[in-house]
Image (cartoon, helix red, strand yellow):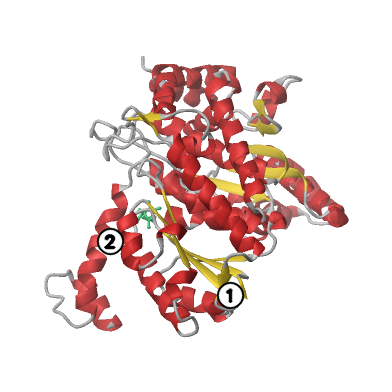
Amino acid sequence: MNNWQALRDHHRMVDNRPIFTLFDDDRAKAFSARADGLLFDYSKTNICETGLSLLLKLVETSDLDAKRAAMFSGARINETENRAVLHTALRNMNDQVLVDNEDVTPALREVYGRMKSFTEDVRSGRFQGAGGQITDVVNIGIGGSDLGPAMACIALSPYAEKLRCHFVSNVDGAHIADVLAGLDPKSTLVIVASKTFTTIETMTNAETAKAWMAKEVAEPATQFAAVSTSLEKTAAFGIDAERVFGFEDWVGGRYSLWGPIGLSIMLAIGADDFDQFLAGAAAMDAHFRNAKPEENLPILLALVGIWHNQICDYATRAVLPYEQRLARLPAYLQQLEMESNGKRVSMDGADLTIPSGPVVWGEPGTNGQHAFYQLIHQGTRIVPCEFLVGREGHEPELAHQHLLLVANCLAQSEALMRGRSLAETTAIMKKKGLEGAELDRQARHRVFPGNRPSTTLCYPKLTPFVLGQIVALYEHRVFVEGVILGINSYDQWGVELGKELALALQPILEGASPDDKDGSTRQLVEYLR
Ligand code: F6P
């Protein structure tokens, strides 16, 4: 019997048991793991010793050790694009990494050094705009060239000083119009962030920003910087090579915030704190490479994910940070997880026989509690929840609010697991004076079925180091899930068809014949043009 079947059989046997009955004195400790100050608790799931050992067998048979070693070594594991996958090299620049027999780290260190000096120049005022000191930075990029830096700049805002960073991604002109409306071109630096430097949204917004800058700045390109793998294209756009920070195609877009794509983060928080961000990720890399599977956070997150998605058939996963500054983490993880593991064929092109990655969504607590938690607690679908919470906030004067935040986070996972039975609800309603048929009816609405799984990731405080650990943890989780599912987590062919059709629709919206389009598209064109 294969491991998947054994897991499914096991699931059928244990599906309805109440999670809270699994708790003995050891469970919390046994079903949690720690790494450099982080605690991952997955004891409030229906995974027991048997389930865990079956899940760990998936790891054994997936050849994870060899595949992880191949990734870190620079092998071309992104087979459909024939590329290495080496975002880890960006945070381990002192360890030699060979791609095609050439050590790539000297070039990484060179570009990183230039990023640091540029950051220092901008922050100190040595680099001047037409109006003197730069006060604002606008990062123009989309997907991986936006979500990571935007997420990290909000997350690390307590460490940001001197510069305000803004992000423009959408081709909707409203986005750039609203961002630029509050800014002075003479004191603004624009970063055009695009791995390919061809993405239509980014290039269109970059031209708009250039025209905006040109109204007040005689040589607008002097207040532009670029990050890309294509140095010819950045030159053609008119950006001086000294403000161009290149990287190689073995850094995937959604894995790129550690290098030049993270320039806006470095400008916001400074080079020393950016070093800390990299150090946190490097610490997670070391943990991922060295810890035993049963103590290995990325592996455990992946196995809990696989248990819920592929075995229990829960199609979505909610990411619920009790940390307002992680407001963009769910959006960031949507790209990281869904663009990586939302695939329908395995590495060799055969159809997948198991579901691929889940739909990832979420919002920070406590806000979500007053919006969609109703469905999480009482809806007919089960949504596994991933809570994140820090021991300490950045506002010591508001420690009482942080305590309330933490209490809410813990209350939610407890409520999801325990629920409230009809008997308990009836007793409560009875005390309030209800009786008879009305008591029965009202009580049923107030029942919480419980037995809904969740995990909690705790960290000391959202510092640059901790953010680095958390992001790298999720990256490696995606890798492990991909390896176990047998898919290529590093390509994204699913985004291409829409791009092609959008190009073809532009002339049609301008008046060309829509005749080869379906009836619905023709009707929409007719309405919209
Ligand atoms: O369309 C998807 C995608 O290719 C993402 O993978 C990527 O992060 C984003 O577009 C932006 O690409 P680029 O950095 O090349 O502009």
The residue sitting at the front extreme is: 126
Crowd band around label 1 with a 10 angstrom C-alpha radius: few (<14), some (14–19), many (20+): some
Q: Name the residue under label 2.
A: 499
For label 1, the SS is helix
The amino acid type, in three-letter code, at marker 2 is Lys
**Mark 2 vs 1, N-terminal side:** 1
Relative depth, front residue between 381 and 414: 414
The amino acid type, in three-letter code, at marker 1 is Ser
Q: In which quarter of the image is ligand 1?
A: bottom left
State yes or no: Cβ of the residue under disc 2 lies below 8 Å from any atom of ligand 1. Answer: yes
For label 2, the SS is helix
| Numbered label tally | 2
The residue sitting at the top extreme is: 1
In percent of width and height, residue 434 lies at 79, 56
Disc 2/disc 1 C-alpha distance (Å):
35 Å
In percent of width and height, residue 118 lies at 55, 57
Image point (58%, 56%), residue name: 119
Horizontal arrangement in the rendering, residue 440 relative to residue 69 (left or right): right
In percent of width and height, residue 137 lies at 56, 67
Relative depth, front residue between 383 and 252: 252
Q: Name the residue under label 1.
A: 187
Q: Nearer the viewer, mark 2 or mark 1?
A: 1
Horizontal arrangement in the rendering, residue 460 relative to residue 208 (left or right): right
